[in-house]
Amino acid sequence: MKNALLILLAALTLSLTACGNKNTQPDTTAATDVGSGSEGATTDRTGAGGGITESALDAETRRRLGELVVYFDYDEADIKPEFNAMLQAHGRNLAANPNMQVRLEGHADERGSREYNIGLGERRAQAVRRVLQLQGAGAQQLTTVSYGEERPAATGSDEESWRLNRRVELVYR
Amino acid sequence: MVRMLRTNARAGLIAAAAALCGLLASVAEAQGFNVVITEGSEAAVPIAVVPFGWQGSGPPAFDVAGVVSSDLASSGRFAPVPTRDMVSRPTQAQQVNFQDWRLLKANYLVIGTLAESTADNFAATFQLFDVVRGESLTSFRLEAARADLRRVSHRIADMVFEKLTGFPGVFSTQIAYVSEERRPDGTKQFRLIVSDADGENANKVAESSQPLLSPSWSPDARRIAYVSYEGGVSGVYVQTLRTGTRERVSARAGVNSAPTFSPDGRFLALVLSRDTGNLDIHSLDLTSQVLRQLTTDAGIDTEPVWAPDGRSIYFTSDRAGGPQIYRVGTEAGQRPTRITFAGPYNARPRVSPDGKQLAVVYGQNNRYQIGVVNIDSGQLQILTDGRLDESPSFAPNGAQIIYATRDARGRAVLASVSTDGRFKTQIASVAGDVREPVWGPFPRP
């Protein structure tokens, strides 16, 4: 599992390098909106000409910054590939705005023992923290807390509820 | 909810008054749960507990037989004969006609009398009979003030239970548990409750809109350690029950979790992640505040619990993949050894009072049940048949385990099972979800 994480981190780093510096600074206004879960960002995507325009890239970044939850597999803390782009956007946003603070709240589903689930939630929060740091976020910008199974997002006892509860929430403050 | 608040306020007043009088503050009346037998055990022994005779002015001061009867039923080992089926109601030995009780298929019979001797002094006498043999097994006389009649009834149940099973009764003990209620505005109310083993005399120890969890008794039953997320961070607290005084003993960066007292009450085992983000078992000297790290593995090490001799700690670790139980010495620099090998998921160990068995959460095929592991042989026996059973805790007599489960409607409730798996009871909550039951120690004189 740790090896998998290392490989993933290496892949992320490579993709970062490949991107080079054609990226623009993330829009701080958009990032401030993030906390309130604003969804309007995609409306910027009007320049539907050829490739990705500068404003489209902005819109994409802003859309990513509006995503605040990372989901995990059962008893796992590996970050799934579909969350790479989102975490990349958040990591760069934090790097560009060193005064920003994010609290990473780790959670687990209800199955198994409560205190072991606190451990799982913490491990997930730490996995997100490492990726964000790799993207340039400073250690002092990130705090973690694990709630284990104590604060479920969905209250059912079924696969769908469990999937929604195995998560890390990014809370900008 | 309103009713709950009012009773709590009243409880507070009574507690304050009791503290002034220098009494133990186990006096509030906030109802926590009722013991109801939802799974009648085939093996439960029929016993008749006849309503006690009353010698005094006015109506009977207390229903001693009612408490004795429900105590015995709550163990799952006894099936009391309904009072309405009793054809005779003897209160003295010479009135007993064994044939009446054989017809009712009662194996045992308890009779007694409650007598008022002075204004606030009562004497309860009882006698236990073997109906099959037609002989008396034991008899006893206890004196008490009015306020202690419930306690006296529990002691009678304790004596009957011990005479018939060989195990000391646990009806005079207390349990702690966590309740969670959803308020109308959608916020949550977490409470840490201490009550008698039968759910009566429920007292609120702590209350928060943030999660409360992991209650643990001190060996003298005077303090409770627990985790609170008040302020949005985890902290380990130790609270003295009688005074309500509490101390935050750990609120370090990261995880502060899973406290348990050492058998001498001087140390607290707890789980910290500190700066590394990695959960490890630590031991905190409650007097000197000196902290010692006992495990260093990169896996999740958590849920520590002390062996009865205080020289080692059992804990959960996923260092080898899935969670399993390990043991580590409490001296510095010991290497943990693995205890459980049966199945992919064994967690949250609790040690039996004799130190020979562990109660665990056993997980397999998306199902979580309570099991007991023989420490020497490693052999596992699954005791329960729920899907989301958790938080096992041994009764101090080692004969029973209380745990958290779900009822047919999916509500979080408490249940108990005998250590051999034969006797089961489910415990219904009056309001909200209840979980994380922890059985307290025997009361000390």
Image (tube, rainbow, N blue to C red):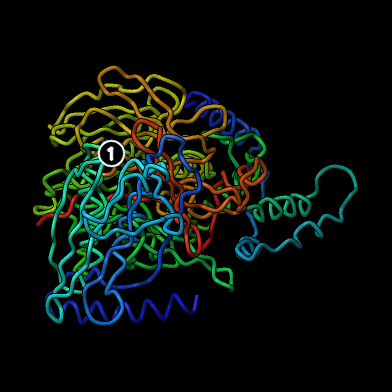
Query: Residue A134, can we see it?
Result: no
Image position, residue B127 (x, y; %) = 20, 52
Q: Residues within 10 Å of mark 1 (few under 14, many from 20)?
A: many
Which residue is farthest right? A49
The residue lying at 65 percent from left, 33 percent from top is A18
Image position, residue B437 (x, y; %) = 36, 51
Height in image: B302 above or below A103? above
The residue lying at 63 percent from left, 55 percent from top is A26
The residue lying at 32 percent from left, 19 percent from top is B378
Residue at image mark 1: B304
Between B174 and A37, which is closer to the camera in this rendering?
B174
Amino acid type assigned to the residue bearing label 1 in the image: Pro
Between B28 and B223, which is closer to the camera in this rendering?
B28
Between B354 and B435, which is closer to the camera in this rendering?
B354
Image position, residue A68 (x, y; %) = 61, 53
Which residue is farthest top? B377
Image position, residue B150 (x, y; %) = 26, 65
Side of A47 relative to B35 (left or right): right
Query: Residue B435, can we see it?
Result: yes
Between A28 and B165, which is closer to the camera in this rendering?
B165
